Amino acid sequence: MKMQWSLILALVFALITAVFAVINVEPVQVNLLFNSVHIPLILLILGSTLLGGIIVGSFGIYRGYRLQKEVKQLSAKLAQIQEATGYEFPENPTSASEPQENAEGDARENADAANPSSQA
């Protein structure tokens, strides 16, 4: 669901940027330290937006790569620890939590039975 909202927001941002760029088509002077050029403002706006998107996307890809590498390292470490200790995870982790929930319910019932004044 988060990915869908991100896509929708990106499309809305792209639409707003495109409308803003189309409205501003007159040429402007851009000073590049060693030279100055005249280019249409629409190209400057779209180019800046594209460059910003590339920079943000690059950081996202780098972060994903780094997290994936960390997951592989931690998985290898977990496998090494499991091999050394002989411990294996239970196949169905939800069945392990059910007795705990039943125990909490039984504790509440026992407390209610022991204290009849709370039932009134």
Image: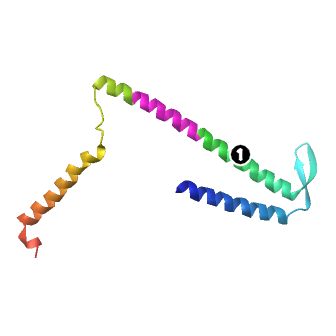
Report the residue marked by disc 1.
54
Q: Position of residue 38 (x, y in %)?
A: 93, 53
Is 40 placed above or below 92 here? below
Taking the image as shown, residue 78 lies to the left or right of residue 90, namely right
Taking the image as shown, residue 62 lies to the left or right of residue 116, namely right
How is the rendered protein coloured? rainbow
Amino acid on which disc 1 is placed: Ile
Q: Quadrant of residue 118?
A: bottom left
Q: Choose between 45 and 99: the one closer to the eye.
A: 99
Q: Position of residue 57 (x, y in %)?
A: 66, 45
Is 61 placed above or below 86 here? below
Q: Quadrant of residue 63?
A: top right
Taking the image as shown, residue 87 lies to the left or right of residue 3, namely left
- The residue located at (20%, 50%) in the rendering is 99
Regarding mark 1 in the picture, which secondary structure is present there?
A: helix
Q: Position of residue 76 (x, y in %)?
A: 43, 28
Find the magenta span and give its range: 63-77
Is 56 placed above or below 9 here? above
Residue 78 counted in the magenta span: no
Q: Quadrant of the C terminus?
A: bottom left
Taking the image as shown, residue 88 lies to the left or right of residue 16, namely left
Q: Main secondary structure of the magenta part?
A: helix
Q: Residues within 10 Å of mark 1 (few under 14, many from 20)?
A: few
Is 15 placed above or below 38 here? below
The extreme bottom residue here reads: 120
